[in-house]
Amino acid sequence: MLHVPVLLEESLDFLLHDLSGVYLDLTFGRGSHSQEILNRISSKGSLHAVDRDLEAVSYGKNKIKDSRFSIYHSNYSAIDSLFPQQQFDGVLLDLGVCSTHLDDSIRGFSFQSDGPLDMRMDTSSGFSAAEWLNSASEIEISDVLYEYGDEKASRKIAKAIVQYRANKLMNTTIELTRTIETVLKRTGKTHPATKSFQAIRIHVNNELHHLKMVLSKLHDALKVGGVIVIISFHSLEDRIVKNFFRPEVEELPKDIPINSYVKETFRCIKKKIKPSSNEIKMNPRSRSAIMRVFSKL
Ligand SMILES: C[S@@+](CC[C@H](N)C(=O)[O-])C[C@H]1O[C@@H](n2cnc3c(N)ncnc32)[C@H](O)[C@@H]1O
């Protein structure tokens, strides 16, 4: 299935305030936002795109042949070394994974099809979900499920995983799904493995850390008047975004160098934009999206 872009019109209406500007799409994915940015900007404008997923980058290189466009394989938290000295008119962050990740069983993101338990967006580095689940302590697994998945049965699931791996390493998505199903029975529409898969994916990709890192670097990466559009898909991400730009910040990131953090120098342009009921009907995945827009003063 193709990745259907979320809040496409709304995000670009805010982002593209100067059609001859230099723009940065930090989450290229399958390039729907990038393609539409290129459709709208003038021949003087340009777009750089980034993705940590090798498949997304090679898709972009093959798909978009446009002299105004370039694409890089990198984590977005490395924008300062990727674009030293450069400042942009607008930066887009459309967070999380693509539908193409979830649909490809080989990537191990989905409990709906069997595949290797990988879950890395960047398969060229880091550790897979299987490597982590087969080596982490029971308490560590339980903490991740609770913290990143809000999974109330986190302790029982962690215990079941540790018991399973005492006999056999856990290597596939179906093994993990069945282990979770021994603890949680299906009630209602949501599959019992949903929260655990989300939590493990966030942990394996260190998603919240990279989000905090990139936020701390955006000030230097933007021109004065430059716009940042951020679309998040769960409350953990949205809370980090909201708190980062809030004047009375309670939750300053503790694990990153924050010397570039200047709370007085961003203006909130739009607080909370949600997809229309029509968009949610056409693309149910969009229902949890929240978009926030800021500009550099
Ligand atoms: C929701 S998709 C973006 C969809 C895109 N806007 C489109 O129109 O197709 C998110 C993308 O961001 C990438 N991504 C997530 N975290 C990243 C990070 N820390 N650095 C770079 N890319 C990241 C993922 O690999 C994925 O391709």
Image (cartoon, rainbow, N blue to C red):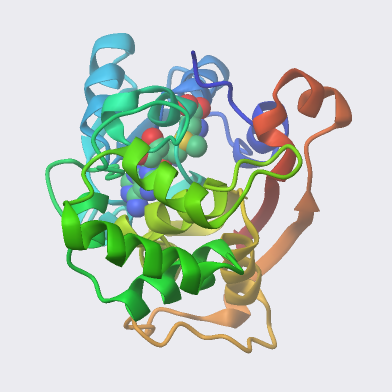
Q: Which x, y percent locates residue 136? A: 23, 71
| Residue 294 found in image quarter | bottom right
| Residue 68 found in image quarter | top left
Q: Which residue is at 23% across, 49% downward? A: 170
Q: How many marks do you count on the picture? A: 0
Is residue 44 visible to the viewer in this orientation of the structure? yes
Please state which of residues 73 and 138 is positioned toward the viewer in this rendering: 138
**Hey, which residue is sitting farthest left in the picture?**
124
Is residue 217 visible to the viewer in this orientation of the structure? no
Please state which of residues 160 and 42 is positioned toward the viewer in this rendering: 160
Q: Is residue 27 left or right of 172 when viewed as pictured?
A: right
Q: Which x, y percent locates residue 137? A: 26, 76
Q: Which residue is at 81% across, 22% downward? A: 281
Q: Which x, y percent locates residue 25? A: 43, 38
Q: Is residue 24 above or below residue 9?
A: below
Q: Is residue 174 left or right of 10 when viewed as pictured?
A: left
Q: Is residue 226 above or below residue 2?
A: below
Please state which of residues 286 and 194 is positioned toward the viewer in this rendering: 194
Q: Quadrant of ligand 1?
A: top left
Q: Quadrant of the C terminus?
A: bottom right
Q: Which x, y percent locates residue 253? A: 45, 82
Q: Which residue is at 62% across, 48% downward? A: 185
